[in-house]
Structure formats: C-alpha cells, structure tokens
Amino acid sequence: MNSESIRVLVAVKTYPTLSSEYNELVCTAGFREDGSWIRIYPVPFRFLQEKQQYKKWQWIRVKTVKNNKDFRPESYRPYDLENSIQLEDEIPSKNSWKARSEFALKHVWNNMTELAKAAQRDNISLATLKPKEVKNFIWERTSEEWDHKKLERILSSLNQGSLFDTTSRQGFEIAKKIPFKFSYVFSTEDGKERTMMIEDWELGMLYLKMYNKFRNEEVACEKVKEKYFRTMINGRDLYFFVGTTLKFHKVNVANPFIIIGTYWPPLVKNEELSLFD
C-alpha cells in the first residue's frame, strides 16, 4: 500500500482509550492545507517519543496510508510510527483566533438533522457544528475501571517488552479511566434538543486535575462544567467538532456523531474586526 506524506493542523485529540488490538490509543483529527478534515487513527500518543508528541493547533507532517479497516473517507492511519510524524509550527490564538478560524470555520454546519443525513448519504464523518442554543452540560457515572481483559493484555505486553520497543516504557502508567460520561444538551437550527457525549483529551485531564485537587468527584465534575458550560459560552462563540464512531456510523441514522472537541474563540465586535482585516 502506497504511503502519503500529509501536512495536518491538529484540532482534536480524544482522551486515551484501550483497544483490544492496538493497546492505549488516541484519535487525532484536524485539517489538511486545503481545509478538509482528516482523521488519524490509531495513534499510541503517550508511547511516542517526545519529539513526536504534537499539540492542538500545531502543524504536523505525518506519513499515512488509507485505513483499509475504516470505510469513512477521512480516516487514515500512520505509516511507520517511529519515523512518520514531524512537528512543525503552532498557530497561536492571537487576533481572536483568526488564523485558526480560517480552518476551523471554513465549513460550518448549523443543522444537526442535515448533518446526520449527509453522514448517511456522503459518509461525512467529521464536521464543525454550530449549536443554536447550549442548554446544559451534564454527566452520568460509568465504569470506574478499564475492561479487565484489555488492561491485562496491555500490561503483559509492557512487562514482556513487546509493546512499542522503540519507546522507553520505564515508569509508564496506563491512562486513568474517567468514571463519568460528560454531555452537552443543545439545539441547532432544526429546533431539536439533543444530548451528545463529548470525548475530549482536555476535558478528561481537567477532571483528573480537579479531582486530585479537591478529592471530591462531584466538585471535580462541577469544575469541568464551569469551564465547558460557562467559560466557553460567556463572551465566547462556541462550536463543536463532531465525529462519527465507526461502530455506529451506519447504524444510528438519526445521529451517529459524538463531540470530539470544542472551539470557542472570543466574540469579536464589528469595530474590532476591521482592525484585523
């Protein structure tokens, strides 16, 4: 299979999950230079060498091949992980995130019903969605531990030295399981209220940081809500980065998407816009 070197502006990193086949993984999504979406999966992000660990809103050059296990057109997988990722410049948030918005807001969906139809009709699996009204941010308890069989297999691989031998495994710990599922409650131009789960690396890390600080799950969840429901709305222009899951893309016709990231540039007044045009 022929590989292709692609330049990608990273916009999304999901919280690590465990995979029966690929161990601990992160789903990465972002924009090509022409503004189109691309998904890069699987990426064992925390096993990568430091010189390959990219940030959000950083350009990377990655050698990829089309993921032949995934029918979604945006899906690619890394080729030769040890040498396939090169870090380039970061795009700063100055000028009200103007340079970032040239990619993030190049094509925005305002109607969730129409987006779901496009997913079935055209296999669209990544998009920027503008909610009309964000009504709430909620959470519900899930399992506190990773799947035991998956975890045992990964730990066995680590102990045997057979997992990503090019990277030092000394002191490595599997990512902690987040014991809650967080969701936005919102509507779009179709007028329908929806509850959609969010799987965002920064959300998971924020929860762990707040729990470690206060040692109280409810307080930690409230602190997450303070950022994702209040800070991201007050004086901000909130958008969702959404993506389908491979498992449900063809099954959940009404809505195969989850929220995989947020984009919340500051609101800009008309007179401010003229300063940057």
Image: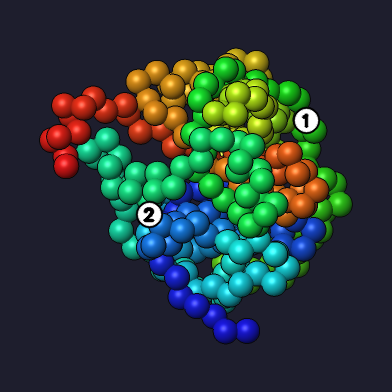
Question: Residue 5, percent across and down?
Answer: 46, 75
In the image shown, does 102 or 140 lie closer to the viewer?
Answer: 102
Question: Residue 42, percent across and down?
Answer: 64, 61
Number of callouts in the render? 2
- SS for callout 1: loop
Residue at figure coordinates x 81%, y 53% from the top left: 150
Disc 2 marks which residue? 58
Q: In this view, does 60 lie above or below 277?
A: below
- How many residues crowd around disc 2 within 10 Å: few (fewer than 14), some, or many (20 or more)? some
Residue at figure coordinates x 44%, y 22% from the top left: 233
Name the colouring of the figure: rainbow
Task: Point out the residue furthest to the bottom here.
Answer: 2
Residue at figure coordinates x 45%, y 70% from the top left: 6
Let me know if residue 9 appears in the view.
Answer: yes
Is 236 on the left-hand or right-hand side of 261? left
In the image shown, does 65 or 169 lie closer to the viewer?
Answer: 65
Q: Do the residues under discs 1 and 2 have CB atoms within 8 angstroms?
A: no
Disc 1 marks which residue? 142
Quadrant holding the N terminus: bottom right
Amino acid beneath label 1: Thr
Residue at figure coordinates x 16%, y 26% from the top left: 271
In the image shown, does 15 or 164 lie closer to the viewer?
Answer: 15
